[in-house]
Image (spheres, rainbow, N blue to C red):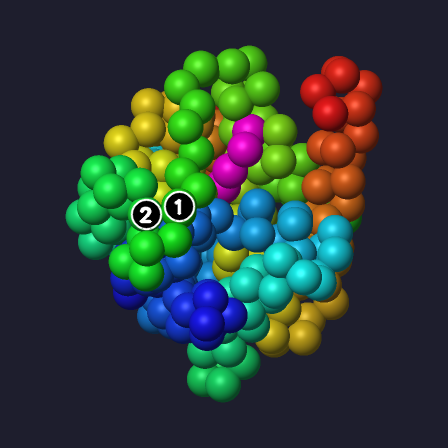
Amino acid sequence: MNFLVALVAGLLFGAGLLLSRMCDPERVLAFLDVAGAWDPALAFTMGGAVLVAVPAFHFVRKRHVDLLGAPTSLPDRFEITPRLIGGSAIFGIGWGLSGICPGPSLLLLTGGSVSSLVFVAAIVAGFFAARGFDVVTGRS
Amino acid sequence: MIGAGVAVLLLLDGRIAGISGILDHAVRGAFGSQRWRLAFLVGLVTPAAVYGLGAIRFAQGLPVLAIAGLLVGFGTRVGSGCTSGHGVCGIANGSLRSLLATLTFMASAAIVVFIVRHGSTA
């Protein structure tokens, strides 16, 4: 059952990314280029997604279970840590260089280009590097 | 539609649609309890696979893409989320952590784009 739910959720998410052109690096960079010919469209895409998701989070927050009665796993962390800010800043550098974040990178894979393969392989390598970082800093 | 995807996963499965986290867990071992992650990822890429991407041009050559990908992978794990997990889910969840994370990666990305596009003329 949750296999099917996750598939449908992924379909909606992927269709949204495709229709909003969030998978087009040029479009994303135009959004990030606030000093150039700024294209605000993606701010509306993201804002719209947040607006639709807010009632769902509100509902689950209040009840602590999903619609099928199963317990939910919402993150409940509040500390603002150097890891959170530092990691996000590093992610932003990569995003600003490429115009690609993790979701769209997977959509780009379907085009079969070498560029997309290199990018996603590098993301996965970055995951492993982060795990190494966790070991070195004694976090895991 | 992105918001609807987030809502479906949360309301019917009680989970957060954070793509960097889903992908990280999925590449570590795609069996057992990981199955929902694979299903989500299959769904995610299906519309693009069926309808095509349209005209896509990569902004950078392979070496810069490789470096950028490394930074994206490393940064999203250390920072606990990307555009979907912090930017959409976290903010919708009213999380100050996610709001600050989102402002941080938007700011650093905008600074990088500014340097790349306008740095030589400044």
Q: At which x and y percent is residue A105? A: 57, 58
- Judge whether residue B14 is colored magenta: no
Q: Amino acid at mark 2?
A: Val
Q: Is residue A8 left or right of residue B77?
A: left
CB-based contact (under 8 Å), mark 2 and mark 1:
yes
Q: Residue at x 57, y 60 (%)?
A: B37
The span shown in magenta is B79-83
Q: Nearer the viewer, residue A57 or A11?
A: A57
Tag 2's secondary structure? loop
Q: At which x and y percent is residue A122? A: 74, 49
Q: Nearer the viewer, residue A35 or B71?
A: B71
User: Spatial distance from mark 2 to mark 1, Cα to Cα?
Assistant: 5 Å
Tell me where residue B9 sits by quadrant: bottom left
The rendered magenta stretch, by its main secondary structure, is classed as loop
Q: Residue at x 46, y 72 (%)?
A: A1
Whether residue A14 appears in this view of the structure is no
Query: Which numbered tag is attached to residue A129?
Result: none
Q: Quadrant of the N terminus of chain B?
A: bottom left
Mark with earlier residue (2, 1): 2
Residue named by callout 1: A72
Q: Is residue B115 left or right of residue B26?
A: left
Residue named by callout 2: A65
Q: Residue at x 54, y 33 (%)?
A: B80
Label 1 chain ID = A
Q: Residue at x 77, y 45 (%)?
A: A125
Q: At which x and y percent is residue A39? A: 29, 50
Q: At which x and y percent is residue A56? A: 24, 50
10 Å crowding of disc 1: few (<14), some (14-19), many (20+): many
Image vertical order of residue A123 relative to residue B50, above or below:
above
Tag 1's secondary structure? loop
